[in-house]
Image (cartoon, coloured by chain):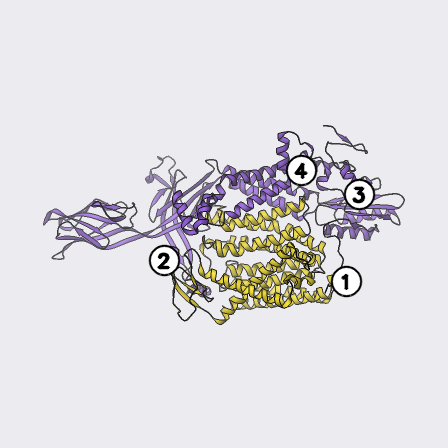
Amino acid sequence: MQLASLSGNLLFISFIAYLVATLFFGGAVKGAKTQESYENNRWGRIAIVITIMGFLTHLGYFITRWIASAHAPVSNMFEFITAFAMMVVGAFILLFFLYRTPSLGLFALPLAVVMIGYASMFPRELSPLIPALQTYWLTIHVITAAIGEAILAISAVAGLVFLLKNIDLTKKSKQRFWLESVMFTLMLVVGFILSSSTFAIMGYEAKFTYINKNEQAAQIVYNYPPLFGMNEYESLTPDKMTPLAEMPPIINAKTLTTFVWSVATGIVLYILLRLILRRPIAALFQPFAKKANSQVMDEIGYRSVLIGFPVFTLGALVFAMIWAHEAWSRFWGWDPKEVWALITWLFYAAYLHLRLSRGWEGEKSAWLAVIGFVIIMFNLIAVNLIIAGLHSYA
Amino acid sequence: MNKIKCQCGHENPFGTVLCEQCGRPQTEDAKKSKLIDMRYEGSARRSQTYKRSIVDKIWNFFSSVKVGINIIIAVLATSAIGTIFPQKLFVPATTEADILAYYEKHYGFAGTLYYKLGFYDMYSSWWFIILIGMLGASIIIASVDRVFPLYKSLKKQRTKRHTSFLKKQRIYAEGEVADSNSSLAKAEKKLKELRYNVKTEDGALLAEKGRFSRWGPYVNHTGLIIFLFAVLLRTLPGFYVDETIWLREGETRAIPGAPGYYLKNNEFIIETYSKEEDAAFGQAIDRVGTIVKNYQSDVTLYKDAEDGIPGRTDQMEFVKNYSIVVNDPLSFDGFNVYQMDYRLDELKSMTFQLTEKETDMSFGEFTVDLLNPERLYELNEGATVELKEYFPDYDGVENGEPVTNSPIPNNPAFIFKMVTPSKPKGEISFVAIRQTLETEVNELKASFVSAETRDITGLVVRKDKTLYILLLGGIIFMIGVAQGSYWNHRRIWIQKSEGNALLVAGHTNKNWFGLKKELDKVRIYADLPQHEDRQDSGFGSDEMKGDKQ
């Protein structure tokens, strides 16, 4: 148990380290007057040292949790996303030493921070492995896939920097709209983290009995004030809020409630920011991207796809198929998670072909990288929480 | 077709853009452009050369990368649509009408539409299969169209190139140096240090490395084709066995799809995590409730005796004992048997007692095997019970007759004829769980004493002869994709011009940043003229710009 709490503390240290390192990278970008000082100044050096320290404690979290639970800590949402965040930071560190770009860190580290925050909203206790997961393939498949996805995520970060730098935010345009949409989506994630942790701190709990879709009685606990009630719900905690509407059995009203709360919080947050700033949120970040070299960002974006794609293929398709053959007797079963891994793979295959043969570089390529990351996140979040709700997975 | 003769004397195939040997532009477009298009080395590709017959047109269609990308996007989009609602495969219904009803009930109008459009069985639909076929055609044709011309021109390339070829490269420099011969010699030394293959010819130098990365795409495409071929093979009979077998504890059955083999289920085990043994997971167990730790079938595999008669279960030969668990199937002779499902506590037998109602005197107990019940049971003092009729899955009375739903003993019911010395004609009694019906008032009764249950394991039997082909395809794909991604094909040309002037040009298939870094090292060491990157991309060159605020 000692180990488990140590593990949690190490993760918290990493979280703080990434936050601090982000500020230092900000300083490194802001303070740079020349190409040389941009690539190598004191702020930047401190930032990368803090990042590496954060990465080491993150690795410490990973190892201690592995020892405490006796299996690779990649078996549920919390574990997977924190591991994913760690690999994003790892990939960033690698690319930082290749290209010396503090701007990349300025955007990659907040991504890791948001991911750890998001992960922490899921149950965090050590959980045992169900029979389907009890094999070394869990370690091999999930870790390789996560490394591949993390490298691909860096390509999206480079793409985002490229777009922030090159899109004119002073005039109305399609590009401005979509870039702002990316920012808006990030706000929704922050909205989820904020609302979820607020109610968690308040210790909010509302209990209901309901009839599930197999027409059996079941119990459910909401951690948000219940906006929507489950099918034929009856409250066990009458002093808490009464749901506004009852949902049919096929819809998980608890998930819907969480979703609506998060979106609402995100929208409020976004509107507040817009009112304070009086310009697009993207414009707030733009100055930090301005000093990045577009050529280098484009190169990083492309290179990380080149490095990440084979790793992703190996982890998310090849190893996945071998494991599926061992565990479920078929290497491919058109399960939604599998299909979305295939979709991700096809998407990056299209990216590479467009780039190699159609000359899609620069802005087009940057947009593709961002879309690719959206697909990865869709597979991670939506497929697990929405689609797989019908066909339960792991 | 006519050959194109270049000024250097080399005869190029019709359709060539850049001379295979000296690199001189051969077409008007190539002569006019500022930078030459180096893709496929300006070689003559069939698709760019012949455009008349139907075959040409089909060839040209599939060889286009643009078409290929569109096919990829189409596969991607249809796959995504297939995940909106669960596929037919995951729907607990068998008849088409039931499936439609399922979609209608759960997803309303959208579900009905999904069904009507055929999206509920997306991945076996004819259009999806045609798309995959087109993807295969595109991969093959596009690769063949490119790989041979590319191979030829890389093989035939000469060290010394025509100035017009060098001048139109993206990385280019020209300028006077102190001593062109010594610069050239130094450059050669440095390039060799950087692990380039260096060739020289008459004041010209060609340094090249990583050419094999150019074959990466064709290798990975070969892997994909092998993979798709194996998937195609699976649809042929005999390549693929997929059967389900339910085995009760203690039961031995022939393995479906694997003639000559038998499997006995010795025991089925389910284990759950406990807070005592798995203390670290206490919190999770509290939150979720029960978490299963293990599903296991302890089985014995038998096969027909070598000289015995096939199918005689009493002449089976023992092969091995095995514990099948999830992730660890039983393997034999190319077959795999997987733990997939189970049912707990099926009734195995029921024990009754025959008594005289008034005196409570017992004639003893008898046990009915619920799968293969015996007809007659002999008890003490000459009493007997005859099983007149047996309903394993009793479901009420229809038209005055009791009915059974299935041969599985879910809810057994019996009609007993009870005979004792004092009742030689016997009495009839209908006995089901928690009820006894009598046609007349009986003096005897068969009362329930106890029941025995057992578990059933659900196993899946698979054999897939294509697995190794699939794996081979996967491995070749991975090799190709790594080869093409992790290595770069870089070339640097350095040539003497008039006096002490040098021309320097560089080309790489990707990672220009890396090429420039290496060329910088050579430039500094060998005192070469400063090169520039002349790519005219949409975002142009950019230097440090101050904040706009």
Q: Chain of mark 3?
A: B
Return the disc, 1 or 2, that comes first in the chain's sequence.
1
**Mark in front: 4 vs 1:** 1
Percent coordinates x, y for residue B277 in the rendering: 42, 63
Which of the two residues, A157 or B471, is positioned nearer the viewer here?
Answer: A157
Percent coordinates x, y for residue B345 in the rendering: 32, 53
Residue flagged by tag 2: what amino acid is it? Gln
Disc 2, SS: loop
The residue pinned by badge 4 equals B147
Q: CA distance from mark 1 to mark 2?
A: 68 Å
Percent coordinates x, y for residue B527 in the rendering: 84, 51
For the question of whether residue A21 can be seen, the reply is no
Chain B's colour is purple
The residue pinned by badge 3 equals B166
Do badges 1 and 3 share one subunit? no
Residue flagged by tag 4: what amino acid is it? Val
Q: CA distance from mark 1 to mark 3?
A: 33 Å
Quarter-of-image position of residue A151: bottom right
Do badges 1 and 2 share one subunit? yes
Disc 4, SS: helix
